Image: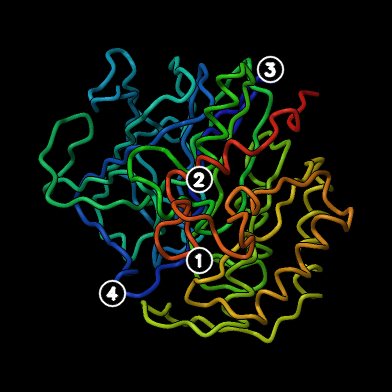
Amino acid sequence: ALAAPAQAEWVASLTAPPHAPLGTQGPFAAASYENVTISQILRISEGGEKVRVRFSNRYGPAPLEIGAARIVQIDDAGNEVAGTSRTLTFGGEAGAVIPRGAPFVSDEVAVSLPDLARMKVEIYLPKDTGPCTCHLTGLDELAVSPPGNFVGKPFEPVSTAQHRAFLTTIEVDSPAALGTIVAFGDSITDGVGSTPGANRRWPDILANRLQEAGKDWAVANAGISGNRVLSPGMGEAALARFDEDVLSLPNVKYLIVFEGVNDIGNRFGARSGGPQLPGLDQPEITVEQMIAGYKQLIARAHAKGIKVIGSPIGPYKGASYWSEEGEAARQRINDWIVNGGAFDAVVRLDLAFADPADPARMREGYHMGDFLHGSDAGLQAVGESIDLALFEAE
């Protein structure tokens, strides 16, 4: 891609960090594509005048070929907005071959997009992709065409899904942008439990509030369902993926860290029922190691001039992997998060979820029935609990 002009104010208006394929069968089976077009619906946070799209073949078994790609704004009914269709190019070429393990960014295209715009991204994949570099919890429609290149053409889907495939970031050049705020976490940040297609994850609520207040911040949701601070499983550990999923994003000014329940749940609790992740190991981690992990994230962010806002781990009593030992670990970790002074600020997302009568448990109606993942109402409360005054323009 050509170099951006010096006055460009690029921000990450959407991100969907990928993770390694989790097997070929069962609920976590990885998709693969060959000679089809996939279209993906998404919503950006900050609008702007130029757009570029970051793709990824981070976990691909072979080079990934993109035959053609296009973006277009859509309205609330899913209809394309006239005058907003743009063909994506790569170094001036219509397609690209993305090496194994690599990201690949399109050339910038000029298109005026409003804040909170809904978008459709189409990609023609002419050759077998193998198990995809995907973000499993996309919570919006991915449609697969019949065989052939349907970029810019209507098609009747042969199948649909709700993951993000090969698409990791929408970067927007906005002259009004104040910067990027990254929400870094697990399934609670990723939006498990919220209504698909409705943009009701708590980072979505935060983005809505910022725009309504006239604060032009981009909000990038870097949550991965099942993610842990110290250990891999659903996605690389937070410490392992931090450079690629946070520090590589443009113009990051603030980071909100809300992660750790999967570390202590898997370490101290016994899961009952439900699918087990392939290859999920659980080291004998300690509270002290968890705190050291948070300190690492803070130090690495501070080295890049990013302010770090921490939240205590949320309540999960009643969840399948809750235990008294895990609760004791949560209390010790949370005491350090609140009182340790390592974070630049603290937000109480845990209390926004909590039942006042039993703060170790999520409030009735604020979870999806599993005492772990937020409902629309719970995620709304969390998104509304964050003080917008924390985000100051430089």
Amino acid type of the residue tagged 3 in the rendering: Gln
* Residue lying furthest front: 357
**Label 3 or label 2, whichever comes before in sequence order:** 3
Residue ID for mark 2: 379
Q: Identify the mark nearer the N-term, 3 or 4.
A: 3
Nearest to N terminus: mark 1 or mark 2: 1
Circle 3 Cα neighbour tier, 10 Å, few/some/many (<14 / 14–19 / ≥20): few
- Going by the numbered disc 2, the residue's amino acid type is Leu
Q: How far, Cα to Cα, is label 1 from label 2?
A: 17 Å
Q: Position of residue 309 (x, y in %)?
A: 75, 46
Disc ID at residue 226: 1
What residue is disc 3 on? 7
- State the residue lying farthest toward the right: 341
How many badges with numbers are in the image? Answer: 4
- Which residue does the numbered mark 4 point to in the structure image? 26
Q: Earlier in the sequence, mark 3 or mark 1?
A: 3
Asked which secondary structure carries label 1, the reply is loop
Q: CA distance from mark 3 to mark 1?
A: 39 Å
Give whichever of discs 2 and 4 has the lower sequence position.
Answer: 4
**What's the CA distance linking mark 2 and mark 4?**
28 Å
Judge whether 336 appears above or below 119 on screen: below
Mark 3 vs mark 2: give the one in front: 2
Q: Give how far across and how far down residue 90 sits, in percent.
A: 44, 35
Say which quarter of the image contains residue 77: top left
* Residue 38 placement, left or right of 106: left
Q: Secondary structure at mark 3?
A: loop
Q: Which sits in the foreground, 378 or 42?
A: 378
